[in-house]
Image (cartoon, rainbow, N blue to C red):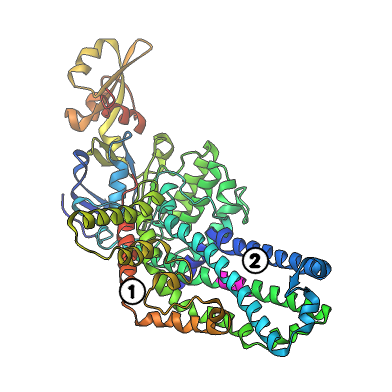
């Protein structure tokens, strides 16, 4: 257990830039942009922005309480939507390259010979990298995303208070404002399980490839897809190619993007109508995420991911670096 | 050769192929505890492969036990008692001195933090320094400080002082002998600077083309090998005794004899002229003749 703690710390030391500073810088830029647009609205809102043919501030002031509640809900949801999408993509990108290089770079710079001189098994080493990518680093990114979102919302409320249009209290009284960040946290266990196929695949390719791991990692699933498409055409098998694409190819490459299950698990009821999305139905995102627990897609992915993580540790055990 | 249960390393028919080429060719040897063994051989002779086999880094054929364990199947257990420096400085570039010490202290039950810090005090390394900011020599210093602070039963050093200047090299071997080594420990070291480790070795092993060409204690070596400056009238007599090497110094022949190989005795050689004990380097060069031909 102690060894695991130090291995996680070791990953943090090495990847502080990508998993700690990058989200912070990204969050800071977002808050800055929000601040700039708020300032622009405060000082130029009457001239530039129009709502229903009215200058912005007059429109806000003219709204009924019901309209205000709707407007607050839409604003909060859109803001959380933007924050979660951008942070997810940033994290998915960082995690992809982390997993791909985790077992490759140590072979390239031969530092594997140092790590292997210590009493740490290959299994524990590889598992520590998977834990870092699926639990520790996402928790950091999530923390930063929540702080960023809350800061931006508070700044918005501050502006609304200064302008005295009465929307701030509506926003702060919305359950959504507090529930969405909690939902994100509650969906984290799903992420851990969902991300495993990509994490395992990339760790395995990184442990195995002599060079150009990115090329191998992308080429193998894409070529497999091409081959199956070709065979399917040639022999008229009538295979479900879309299924293969979303359950195998994309699962291998994009599962490390948080929330990618909304796109890749077709069993979930999809209702993209914006009015549903924005009027509190978004709260169902959490229950939708947890619905995955009942799908074979999730559990077969977990098994495949675990098998590939184990394979990565076996390859690391025996690969001769010359 | 009997398998000695007290052996730290015991190899029987150890073989390693890379494709069709044989890197290690069915070698057998025993290394008892409390020795410092120099493993000497030209590049590509199989010494690093032999060490890697012992450290469980590569698969191999034959029988090999290190501290009674099979490095193929019991590596995890083995690494609790073995430490090693492989080849050159291999510390990751992002690592800081302080992190390196914290990490090894955290994962290695036999690491003595105070000892490592004591070694580092004698260097220019600072706790916040990253490996990428260090000179090659400094990286090796850090690595050696880490490894020397681990109380391992077997320490394997493959070219440990490569890139270090002469002052630190001497210091290192001095520390190794005085601070680190005791009769419970065994050290296996390979190096190209043979003369530097000569005085600390207790055993010598020459390896060539994947075969052990010489394996003896230093006492046996000084018994076996003798160099003589042969006076002109004795030259033919001396040559008849089959020296393993002959060179000319100031018009006189200097011949190196392996008493075991030529069946000669010390007295016999001493009668030929002025004798001296040859260095390991001389013996190495003589026995490796033709390696690069």
- Examine the rendered structure and indicate whether residue B128 appears above or below residue A306: above
| Residue B119: % across, % down | 55, 53
User: Quadrant location of the C terminus of chain B?
Assistant: top left
Q: How crowded is mark 2: few (under 14 residues within 10 Å), some or many (20 or more)?
A: many
| Residue B43: % across, % down | 33, 34
- Examine the rendered structure and indicate whether residue A296 appears above or below residue A215: below
Q: Residue A297 carries which label?
A: 1
Which residue is depicted at the point 71% across and 64% down?
Answer: A33
Q: Is residue B56 visible?
A: no
**Residue A145 inside the magenta-drawn segment:** yes
Which residue is depicted at the point 33% across and 71% down?
Answer: A301
Label 1 vs 2, first from the N-terminus: 2
For the stretch drawn in magenta, the main secondary structure is: helix
Count up the numbered dots: 2
- Examine the rendered structure and indicate whether residue B249 appears above or below residue A264: above
Q: Mark 1 lies on which chain?
A: A
Instruction: Provide the residue designation for mark 2.
Output: A27
| Residue A267: % across, % down | 36, 77
Left or right: residue B217 compared with residue A169: left
Left or right: residue A159 compared with residue A307: right
| Residue B193: % across, % down | 42, 35
Disc 1 from disc 2: Cα separation: 33 Å
Q: Is residue B57 visible?
A: yes
Of B130 and A54, which appears nearest the observer?
A54
| Region of the chain picked out in magenta, as a range | A140-146
Q: How crowded is mark 1: few (under 14 residues within 10 Å), some or many (20 or more)?
A: some
In which quarter of the view is residue B80 placed? bottom left
Left or right: residue A148 compared with residue B204: right
Which residue is depicted at the point 66% across and 77% down?
Answer: A75
């Amino acid at each position: 257990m102690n060894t695991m703690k130090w291995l996680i710390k070791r990953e943090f030391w090495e990847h502080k830039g990508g998993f700690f500073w990058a989200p912070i810088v990204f969050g800071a830029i977002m808050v800055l942009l929000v601040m700039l647009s708020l300032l622009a609205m405060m000082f130029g809102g009457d001239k530039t922005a129009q709502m229903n043919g009215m200058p912005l501030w007059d429109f806000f002031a003219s709204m009924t309480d019901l309209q205000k509640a709707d407007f607050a809900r839409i604003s909060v949801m859109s803001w959380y939507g933007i924050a979660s999408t951008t942070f997810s993509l940033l994290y998915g990108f960082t995690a992809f390259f982390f997993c791909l290089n985790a077992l490759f770079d140590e072979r390239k710079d031969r530092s594997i010979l140092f790590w292997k001189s210590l009493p740490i098994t290959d299994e524990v080493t590889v598992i520590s990298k998977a834990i870092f990518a699926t639990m520790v680093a996402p928790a950091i990114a999530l923390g930063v995303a929540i702080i960023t979102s809350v800061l931006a919302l508070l700044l918005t409320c501050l502006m609304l208070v200064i302008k005295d249009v009465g929307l701030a209290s509506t926003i702060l009284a919305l359950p959504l404002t507090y529930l969405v960040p909690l939902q994100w946290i509650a969906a984290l266990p799903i992420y851990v399980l969902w991300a495993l196929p990509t994490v395992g695949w990339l760790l395995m390719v990184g442990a195995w490839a002599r060079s150009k791991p990115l090329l191998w990692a992308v080429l193998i699933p894409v070529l497999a897809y091409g081959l199956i498409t070709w065979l399917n055409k040639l022999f008229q098998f009538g295979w479900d190619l879309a299924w293969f694409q979303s359950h195998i190819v994309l699962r291998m490459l994009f599962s490390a993007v948080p929330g990618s299950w909304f796109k890749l698990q077709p069993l979930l009821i999809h209702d993209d109508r914006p009015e549903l999305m924005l009027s509190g139905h978004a709260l169902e995102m959490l229950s939708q995420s947890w619905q995955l627990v009942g799908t074979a897609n999730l559990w077969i992915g977990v098994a495949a991911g675990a098998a590939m993580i184990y394979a990565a540790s076996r390859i690391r055990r025996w690969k001769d670096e010359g | 050769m009997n398998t000695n249960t007290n052996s730290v390393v015991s190899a029987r028919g150890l073989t390693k192929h890379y494709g069709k080429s044989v890197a290690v060719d069915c070698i057998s040897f025993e290394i008892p505890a409390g020795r410092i063994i120099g493993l000497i051989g030209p590049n590509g002779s199989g010494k690093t492969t032999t060490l890697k086999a012992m450290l469980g880094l590569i698969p191999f054929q034959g029988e090999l036990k290190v501290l009674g364990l099979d490095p193929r199947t019991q590596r995890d257990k083995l690494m609790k008692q073995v430490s090693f420096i492989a080849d050159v400085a291999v510390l990751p570039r992002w690592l800081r001195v302080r992190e390196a010490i914290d990490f090894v202290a955290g994962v290695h039950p036999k690491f003595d933090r105070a000892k490592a810090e004591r070694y580092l005090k004698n260097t220019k390394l600072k706790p916040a320094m990253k490996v990428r900011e260090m000179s090659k020599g400094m990286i090796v210093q850090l690595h050696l400080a880490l490894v020397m602070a681990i109380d391992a039963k077997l320490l394997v050093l493959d070219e440990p002082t490569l890139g270090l200047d002469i002052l630190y090299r001497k210091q290192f071997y001095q520390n190794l002998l005085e601070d680190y080594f005791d009769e419970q420990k065994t050290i296996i070291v390979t190096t190209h600077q043979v003369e530097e480790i000569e005085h600390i070795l207790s055993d010598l092993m020459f390896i060539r083309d994947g075969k052990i060409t010489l394996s003896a204690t230093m006492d046996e070596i000084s018994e076996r090998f003798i160099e003589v400056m042969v006076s002109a009238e004795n030259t033919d007599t001396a040559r008849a005794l089959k020296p393993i090497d002959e060179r000319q110094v100031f018009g006189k022949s200097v011949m190196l004899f392996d008493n075991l190989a030529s069946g000669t005795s010390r007295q016999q050689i001493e009668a030929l002229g002025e004798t001296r004990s040859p260095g390991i380097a001389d013996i190495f060069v003589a026995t490796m003749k033709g390696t690069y031909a």
